[in-house]
Every structure is written in C-alpha cells, then in structure tokens.
Amino acid sequence: MSTLSLYELGSLIRQTLYDKLPDAYWVQAELSEVREAYNGHCYIELVEKAEHGNTLRAKARGTIWANVYRMMRPYFESTTGQSFTAGIKVLLQVSVEYHELYGLSLTVHDIDPSYTLGDMARNRRKILQQLEEEGVLTLNKELTIPRLPQRVAVISAIGAAGYGDFCGQLTNNPYGFIFYPKLFSAVMQGSRTEETIIAALNKIAVQRDMWDVVVIIRGGGATSDLSGFDTYALAANCAQFPLPIITGIGHERDDTVLDMVSHTRVKTPTAAAEYLITYLADAATTLDTLTNTIVRGITDRIHREEKRVEKLTQHLPTLCSVKHANGLHRIDQLATRMNIALQHTMMKQSHRLKLIEKVVEGASPKHILQRGYSITRCEGRIVRSAEMLAKGCMLTTTLADGEVQSVVSSSTQKKRKD
C-alpha cells in the first residue's frame, strides 16, 4: 500500500476535480454572507436550505474576483433593483476550485439577474396572497382621502433631500394652499427600513385624529435599496393602517409590496406633493362650481320672483276689485243670516217671556186673592200663626175687593202632634 502526503492527496483531489468538473456550471443558491475585501474581491458563502424549514442541505464558499465583481454587481443591482446582499437567491455561473491549503471553493464568473427577479416576484406574490387570504390586502385602498388633506404625516429620513423637495413643493404651490406637514423619521434603506417605518406608523396611529393622510417618501439613493419595502410585516401594517397612505419612494420600474397595498402610489416625493396639491385644487374647483351654481340659482330665483311680483302688481287692481266685491257679498250674506238668526232668537225669547209672564201672573197676590184667599196683618205684620195674636190685637184683613178691620177677642191654637 502506497503512502501519500497530505499535499499529495490534496493535489490528487484537485486534479480529479479538474478532470471530472472541467467546465463552468450554473448553480442556484442563497447568499448567506457577502464580504467585500479592501482589494476589490468579494467573498461569499452559498447555502441551500430544505424546502420546508431552514435546515441546511449544502454550503460552499465562493470568490468573485475584483475584475468580475466591478462589472457584475452594478449590472445585477440595476437590473433587479435589489442589493447584492445576504438573504437573496441567485443563479451564478461558477467553476469548481480546489487548493491544497484553502480547500474547496467556487469561483463566480457570471450571474443571471432574471432568476433573482423571479424569486423576488415570487416572494411578492406570496406576501400579497397571504394578505389577501387574511382579508386585509385592499383595506387601505378602500379608505377615503378627506376633501381637504392639509394635515400630512410624513415618513422619511432626517435631512433627506426628498423630504425637502416635498415640503418645498407644498409650500410654493401656485394656488396658495396651506399644508401642515410633520416629519416622522425612519431609515429608508438597509436592514432597518421595516423596523423604523413600522415604529413611525405606530407613533402616527397614536395621534391619528391629528392627520388626514400619511406620506411615505424616499428621495435619491440606489434603487438596489428597495428590498426593505418588500416585507410582510411592513405591508401588513400599511394595509391595515387607519389613515390613507401615499407612497413616493423614488423608483419607476417596479412596484414594491408597500406600493401595492398603499392607498395611492406615485413615483417621487415631488409627485406625492403634486398629488396632494391637485387633490386640493380639485376640491376647490368643485367648491367654485357649487358656489357658481348656487349664485346662478339664486339669481334665477330672484328674476322669476321679480316677474311674478310684476305680474301680480299688474293684476292687483282687478284682484282688489274682485276681493272687495266678494267681501261685500260675503258681508251681505252674513248680515242676512244675522238678521234671520236675530228674528228667530227674538221670537224664541218673546215666547219664553210670555210663558214666564203667565207663571208670574199666576203667582201674584192679586190673582191668589181673587181665588178666595185673604191676607191678615197685625200692626203691619202678616199673620202666619195664631201664636202671633193676642186678645185685643187690631187686625187688617185684605180681600180681593177691599179690607176689613177686626179686633181679636180670643185665639185658639191647634195642638201639635208630637
């Protein structure tokens, strides 16, 4: 049995790999590490995970030499709008290298951005499908922007040129509209994009009654920094946010997931400001139209009423004559009816008086005396009882045809029955 040194074994492995894998191969993998060296080279680590879960199935080191990396990275990022960074899936053309000292590695010769674009698109579709299944995908789009959206909560980076352009456009609008923007700062690129934008949204939500709309803007910067706007957590927060969200994050080619769930998407911060100005101008135009309609309506009404008054004025003498004649006729009718009623009332009252007169006449003393009754007085007082009489009293008895004088000689009283 022959004995090999470690170097000899390594050389044998290297030669065997060159013999068996002499060509370059297209390999699908995920970047788990990207490290740029001071000399321009880029060192990467590639991994492949299990279809379900994060279990590693394979891992390999790779090198992109500076002369390739200088051209490959700008090409990839300008095509995909995605940073060449850890966490993305790539399709790389590699050759297998083996070094007795450094071991196995892959040398990267080329990259196919369309594969990454496809993976990014799949990721976006997956997020959008999940939001749709949860029933929140279009919630923000269904909100209504107030007719006068002047109170604007702005999410942008502190000192960003885009925020300055946005505020300048609002301030110098040709209509003289007044807006009240306030900055809620966030990191608009890199790994902290999702975290800081959600934190800004939470601050705005606490004081939601103070704002009409939210504007998320990002001016300048590389289009490769858009991956932070393609996350589920950020999309879910924006889709369910209680105020309309307008996005203007400075790119024209593809919509991010954030753009897709927001109420309105525009291209740039300046375009976001123009959108609000135009929205307010449309409201002002509608108000002017309504004002003109009301003025015309009032003018037309006044004109019609003037004609009506003029027509009534022309017919007033005739109307007065007719009213006067009708009034006289009505007075005559009332007088006739009153006369008839008065005569009827007088006849009833006359008949009633005659009846009363007969009753009174029947109850008069004269009538009673004529029926045989008499009235006896003693010293001017009518005698109603024998108790009132004493012997020797002078009595005056009144009859129907005269009076009789008499003196009481005696009086007899009837005994009372107890």
Image (tube, rainbow, N blue to C red):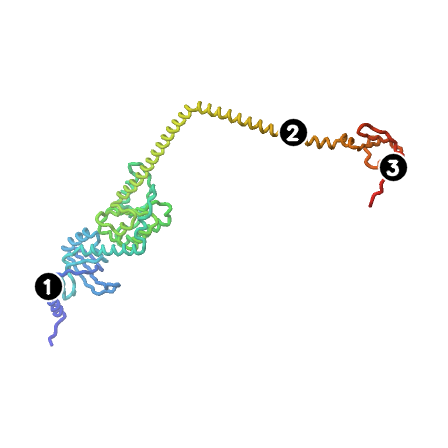
**Residue 283, how many percent across, how many down?**
32, 39
Give the spatial CA distance, label 1 vs label 2. Answer: 148 Å
Judging by the rendered image, the residue that carries numbered circle 1 is 22
Q: Specify the amino acid type for callout 2.
A: Ser
Q: Nearer the viewer, residue 338 or 35?
A: 338
Give the spatial CA distance, label 3 vs label 2. Answer: 50 Å
* Residue at 36 percent of width and 47 percent of height: 208
Determine which of the numbered discs, if any, sits on residue 411 in the image: 3
Judging by the rendered image, the residue that carries numbered circle 2 is 350
Quadrant in the rendering for residue 3 = bottom left
* Residue at 82 percent of width and 27 percent of height: 402
* Residue at 30 percent of width and 39 percent of height: 282
Mark 3, Cα crowd under 10 Å, few <14 / some 14-19 / many 20+, is few
**Residue 23, how many percent across, how many down?**
11, 62
Q: Specify the amino acid type for callout 3.
A: Ser
Determine which of the numbered discs, if any, sits on residue 148 in the image: none
* Residue at 34 percent of width and 41 percent of height: 147
